[in-house]
Image: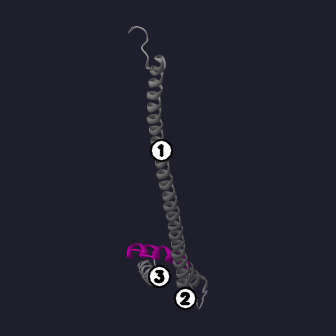
């Protein structure tokens, strides 16, 4: 039993070497502890197959010449698939971040346009109210002047 556990950990170390190579080729940075954990997971199926093969070999004298290579190849395929899935997820996340940044830029632009429109409306209102005040003053002046035609006294002065 101890031999099997030791064998499993050594297999995981062999798989870590391949995983580190694949990670460096795919430009993914990952801690060694996480890589080793993934390697242990990848070697689990190989260990299960090794136990089944050992039982078959012991009980039924079944021997497969290339089994020693097959179990490590299975683990290599498994870890390769996991690393490629991680890479595809990272690519998806980067694409989503790019989309989010584009949407943020659009929203920021819209907000700036709205602020500018509000500023223009306020300035226009201010100009209109200033124009109305002057117009009202002129109208009031005309009304006052309209009560006294040609600047003649209204009769109380006589």
Report crowding for label 3: few under 14, some 14 to 19, many 20 or more residues within 10 A (C-alpha). many
For the magenta stretch, what is the residue range? Answer: 28-51
Q: Residue at x 49, y 59 (%)?
A: 105
The answer to whether residue 72 is magenta is: no
Figure colour scheme: one colour
Q: How many marks?
A: 3
Q: Residue at x 47, y 24 (%)?
A: 142
Q: Quadrant of the C terminus?
A: top left
In x, y percent, where is residue 147? Answer: 47, 16
- Residue 145 sits above or below residue 113 on the image: above
In x, y percent, where is residue 123? Answer: 45, 42
- Spatial CA distance of label 1 from label 3 is 63 Å
- Spatial CA distance of label 1 from label 2 is 73 Å
Using the image, tell me which numbered label, if any, was put on residue 69: 2
Secondary structure at numbered mark 1: helix
- Residue 28 sits above or below residue 133 on the image: below
- Residue 101 sits above or below residue 38 on the image: above
The answer to whether residue 49 is magenta is: yes
- Which residue was labeled with disc 1? 118
Mark 2 or mark 3, earlier in chain: 3
Mark 1 and mark 2 residues within 8 Å of each other at the beta carbon: no
In x, y percent, where is residue 13? Answer: 42, 82
Report crowding for label 1: few under 14, some 14 to 19, many 20 or more residues within 10 A (C-alpha). few
Mark 1 or mark 2, earlier in chain: 2
Q: Nearer the viewer, mark 2 or mark 3?
A: 3
- Which residue was labeled with disc 3? 15
- Spatial CA distance of label 2 from label 3 is 13 Å
Quadrant of the image occupied by residue 58:
bottom right
Residue 27 in sight here: yes
Q: Main secondary structure of the magenta part?
A: helix
Secondary structure at numbered mark 3: helix
């Amino acid at each position: 039993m101890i031999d099997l556990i030791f064998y499993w950990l050594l297999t995981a170390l062999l798989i870590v070497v391949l995983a580190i190579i694949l990670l460096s080729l795919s430009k993914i940075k990952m801690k060694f502890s996480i890589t080793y954990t993934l390697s242990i997971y990848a070697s689990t199926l190989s260990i299960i197959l090794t136990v089944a093969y050992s039982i078959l070999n012991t009980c039924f004298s079944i021997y497969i010449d290339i089994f020693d290579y097959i179990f490590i190849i299975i683990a290599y395929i498994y870890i390769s698939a996991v690393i490629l899935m991680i890479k595809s997820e990272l690519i998806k996340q980067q694409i989503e971040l790019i989309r989010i940044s584009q949407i943020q830029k659009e929203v920021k632009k819209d907000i700036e346009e709205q602020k500018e429109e509000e500023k223009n409306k306020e300035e226009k209102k201010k100009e209109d109210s200033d124009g109305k005040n002057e117009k009202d003053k002129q109208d009031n002046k005309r009304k006052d002047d309209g009560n006294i035609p040609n600047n003649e006294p209204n009769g109380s002065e006589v």
